[in-house]
Image: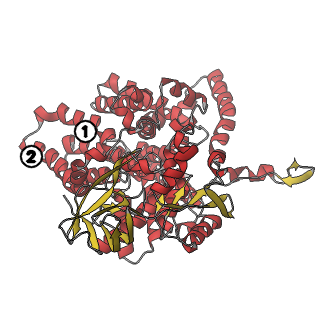
Amino acid sequence: MAESDESAGAGRRKLWIAGLVIAAVHLSLVAYAFPAEVVFGDAGFNKPDYHTHWQQAQVLLELYRETGRLWAYDPGLLAGHPVGLFFDVDNKLHFLWVLALTRLGVGAAAAFNLFAVASSLLAPLSLAGAARLLGYRAPAILAVAGVTVLLWNFDSTLHFLWTAGMLSFATACHLALLCVGLMWAMLRGRRPWLAFAGLAVALPLAHLTHVWAFAILVVPLVGLYLGHARRLDLAGHLRVWLAVAATLAVNAYWLLPALRHLDWLTESAVVGQATPLYLVADYLEVLVNPVNTGYAEPRTLFRFAALLGAAATLVNWRRRRDPRFAVCASTLAWLVGMSYFGTFIPLLKLTEPYRFASSATLLAGLLAAPWLVEHVRPATLRRLSGPARGLVALLVLLVVPRIFSEVTTFVPELQKPLLEGTAIDHRGARVPTPIHSMRLPAVDDHLKSLARHLDELPGDGRVLVQLWPVGEYLRGALRRPVIGGFPDRRVIHEAANLFRLRPDEPRYYGDELGAYLERYHIDYVVFSPPFFPEIERRLDLLEPVRVFGFHKIFHVRRPSTYVVGGRATIDAGFDRIAVRDARADDGRSLVLRFHYMEGMTCAPDCTIERAPIPHDPVGFIRVAAAGESGLPASFVIRREDR
């Protein structure tokens, strides 16, 4: 008995030590990725999608403080578009987090950045929680946490998501697997109401985090419910549907208006369209097309190791008729299938299906842990024959360099001791071997200077921005309106952005370019690498102003105004365009160069209608006199919620 207690105590100590090591490694990696001086800086991280979500957070904070609403007509981007409705369905929880922390006195930028830190910290805990709910023992739960740390930090797809700024989907991936564990415990556990309480919180949050949490969860949750429906009593069915109701209720504030305006959506299947060929390419770590898989050097050793371990676990569960087999096997097949075959299915291709490789990777890590705990341990090695041990040792020696390469891709500073004292030839000079850090950077001074200078330039017209991340940053940083930003916003209002078009678009050339600049009242154009010489050389239309680092400002030589068929002074804000000193050439009507939106009204003594314009299905706003006295000199256009 004493020996048994001593052995159990030693086992617990080993688990504690392993847990502390995993926690220390993970905390170190999070601290490495998110420098404190950047997290608590004055802007979001200097990465493309972080620029998008940071400007969304800034604009929505301003909107909420001004109006108390969470979506509106925003004239500050794309000549007027719906903000807070469609394009930020991957940013809802992130914004609410920012709103809550700013109300507690945290700076907006720090609140925004801390969401990324929190998500990374919680990823291993979410997966460990799912493992616990699925009935794993302590060693396997720790293994899940450890594997999650490896995958989160060193799988190229997962790492790309949360470092490039697609953080909310990465967060939804680990939250969704926690939801699967909670659903399992609610249907089969001894304390179903406790599991329900967790699911009633986690499931709405997962969908609030990213709309495609639904796509991750539809197979496992529906499968679990249908598989247990006959055995459930009334309370069991009630718990399931209450969790569904809670999810719909929490998300209703954005879902209902979005459903009312589906006619504003456009279909797009450009990004993330991987094919079965990409499965082979991922295994071989070959970058085929970064538009589909992300602008990251493929590093997938840990992913495929997890997939092999998951397959071994599933085979073992099937032999033992483990009830977890059906839901886990079907979910893994669903996620892998979406990742590499989703592009062939019309509805799924709209989800950018390769993104689901990240959720498949995390699920594979969750499933691989039982096999790892059972087979990758000293006792297993001791049972091997001498030649088999030699073969294992040889394989370890061969795979260590591959592991080192995988890890140092994302933490290149680990190579520094090997590179100290080495140098390369550069134009006849000997310079130290460079090491490029993968830590998330702050917004550079050139970009900040660009924004400050643009706000100081004369004119009230819009700024057309060629490079989309720069456009996203400038929308949040400028007081003047912008046309630019992410080129695939899935709304018809994106037609205002000239730079969303293909390089052979006729509007880049001839008279069409001048007509476009006039139509949208463009005062300045900003170019960044890769530059656009076809437009930059149009010195009949543009004149250089100033260069900030890699960013070039051009002034439009013949700027227009916001009014067609008259003149007026315009003051535009959320859901509101105030016009004064208006004078129509015909005394009756004029057109405002702002996108029209259903629900707009005009007062006093005026009416509005859509004015068609070339190449833009949204159209501008035509204002006409309501009576015989002519167009009033001052009037206000408002958008009413419908």
Residue 221 marker? 1
Question: Which residue occupies the extreme front position in the image?
Answer: 586
Q: Which-is-in-front pick, marks 2 and 1?
A: 1
Kind of residue at disc 2: Ala
Q: Using residue 43 as the reference point, say whether residue 59 is left or right of it.
A: left
Q: What residue is drawn where x is 21% and y is 44%?
A: 189
Of 141 and 529, the residue lying toward us: 529
Q: Quadrant of the C terminus?
A: bottom left
In the figure, is residue 59 to the left or right of 248? right
> In the current view of this chain or complex, which residue is farthest to the bottom?
105
Q: Quadrant of residue 346?
A: top left
Looking at this view, is 621 or 362 the one in front?
Answer: 621
Q: Look at the image and tell me whether residue 313 can be seen.
A: no
Q: Secondary structure at mark 2?
A: helix
> Residue 349 appears in which quarter of the rendering?
top left
Q: Secondary structure at mark 1?
A: helix
Q: Which label is found at residue 38?
A: none
The single residue placed furthest to the left in the displayed view is: 234
Query: Is the Cβ of the residue at disc 2 closer than 8 Å to that at disc 1?
Result: no
Q: Position of residue 505 (x, y in %)?
A: 53, 39
Label 2: few (<14), some (14–19) or many (≥20) C-alpha neighbours in 10 Å? few
Residue name at image x 34 percent, y 51 percent: 619
Q: Out of 213 and 10, give the one closest to the viewer.
A: 213
Residue type highlighted by circle 1: Leu
- The quarter of the displayed image where residue 458 is located: bottom right
- Residue position marked by numbered label 2 in the rendering: 235
Q: In terms of depth relative to the viewer, which is nearer, 315 or 571?
A: 571
